[in-house]
């Protein structure tokens, strides 16, 4: 009788003991994805995790991790090993990481002067739902009279979020990428003296048209770069 009880106890213990190996692979991938999207040092955390066991090593190489890793938090790597940083960015952009696409877009437009490649990356970031990329693409397209209407459509999508917040976020990233100043180019300003005046209890600027509002935003962006 005692022997049967002992066997049952052993079986129960075996059933209730959890080890990493007993977890489904999907769950391990999700745990690693959560870590790399929230960690302040995702690359070094991922490397440490890869050394702990083969399950984590396998999980860290999946597409989902490349899609979710937050590379904006690794700006210091951009300074001490730019080549490696961009290699990681390109790998992540290839699997559809919107933040990686956004940073590569900024690098190509504002640092390397490759506008069309930069716009391709920004478009990928927009598909991934990256708000800062919508704003950046909007500003860039607004700058050319041939694509101004498209630029305004994109900028209107950002209006609800608040352009001040998004502009600050984009400018912060641009300054990390390059110290180069870009000129806004020739853009016609409104001659109405009351256009852009601060009015009302909420101290909002009042413009005579949508074009005037986005022209002001466009100039604000380049002035603060
Ligand atoms: Zn105006």
Image (cartoon, rainbow, N blue to C red):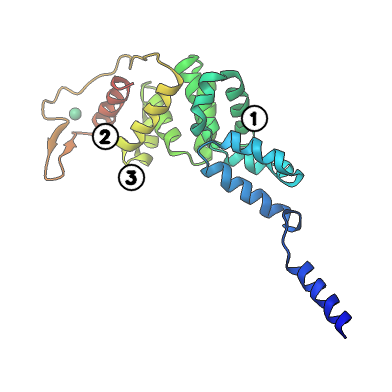
Q: Nearer the viewer, residue 86 or 194?
A: 86
Q: Which mark is residue 91?
A: 1
Residue 97 placement: quadrant: top right
The tag earlier along the polypeptide, 1 or 3, is 1
Mark 2: secondary structure:
helix
Residue 186 seen by the camera: yes
- Residue identifier under label 2: 210
**Camera-nearest residue between 57 and 203:** 57
Total numbered labels:
3
How far apart marks 1 and 3 lie (CA) works out to 32 Å
Q: Residue at x 59, y 28 (%)?
A: 89
User: At 47% from the left edge and 16% from the top edge, which residue is drawn?
Assistant: 111
Q: Residues within 10 Å of mark 2 (few under 14, many from 20)?
A: few
Is 18 or 117 nearer to us in this picture?
A: 18
Alpha-carbon neighbours of circle 1 within 10 Å: few (<14), some, or many (≥20)? some
| Residue shown at the point (41%, 29%) measured from the top left | 136
Q: Quadrant of ligand 1?
A: top left
Q: Nearer the viewer, mark 2 or mark 3?
A: 3
**Label 3 environment density (alpha carbons within 10 Å; few <14, some 14–19, many ≥20):** few
Q: Which numbered disc, 2 or 3, marks the residue that appears first in the sequence? A: 3
Q: Position of residue 168 (x, y in %)?
A: 34, 32
Q: In the image, which disc is placed on residue 160?
A: 3
218 relative to 136 in the view: left or right: left
Image quarter hosting the C terminus = top left
Percent position of residue 40, x then y: 50, 38
User: Which part of the image, by quadrant, shows the N terminus?
Assistant: bottom right
Residue 21, placed above or below residue 221: below
């Amino acid at each position: 009788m005692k022997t049967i009880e002992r066997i049952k106890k052993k079986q129960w213990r075996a059933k209730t003991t959890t080890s990493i190996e007993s977890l489904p692979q999907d769950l391990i991938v999700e745990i690693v994805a959560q870590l790399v999207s929230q960690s302040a040092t995702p690359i070094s955390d991922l490397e440490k995790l890869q050394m702990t066991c083969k399950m984590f090593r396998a999980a860290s190489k999946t597409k989902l991790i490349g899609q979710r890793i937050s590379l904006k938090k690794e700006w210091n790597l951009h300074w001490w090993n730019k080549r490696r940083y961009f290699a990681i960015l390109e790998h992540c952009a290839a699997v559809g990481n919107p933040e990686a696409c956004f940073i590569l877009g900024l690098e190509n437009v504002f640092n390397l002067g490759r506008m069309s490649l930069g716009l391709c990356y920004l478009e990928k970031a927009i598909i991934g739902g990256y708000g800062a990329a919508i704003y950046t693409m909007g500003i860039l397209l607004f700058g050319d009279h041939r694509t101004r209407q498209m630029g305004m459509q994109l900028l209107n999508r950002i209006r609800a979020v608040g352009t001040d917040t998004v502009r600050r976020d984009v400018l912060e990233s641009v300054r990390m990428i390059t110290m180069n100043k870009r000129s806004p180019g020739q853009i016609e300003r409104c001659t109405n003296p009351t256009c852009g005046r601060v009015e009302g209890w909420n101290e909002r600027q009042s413009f005579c048209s949508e074009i005037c509002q986005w022209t002001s935003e466009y100039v604000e962006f380049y002035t603060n770069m």
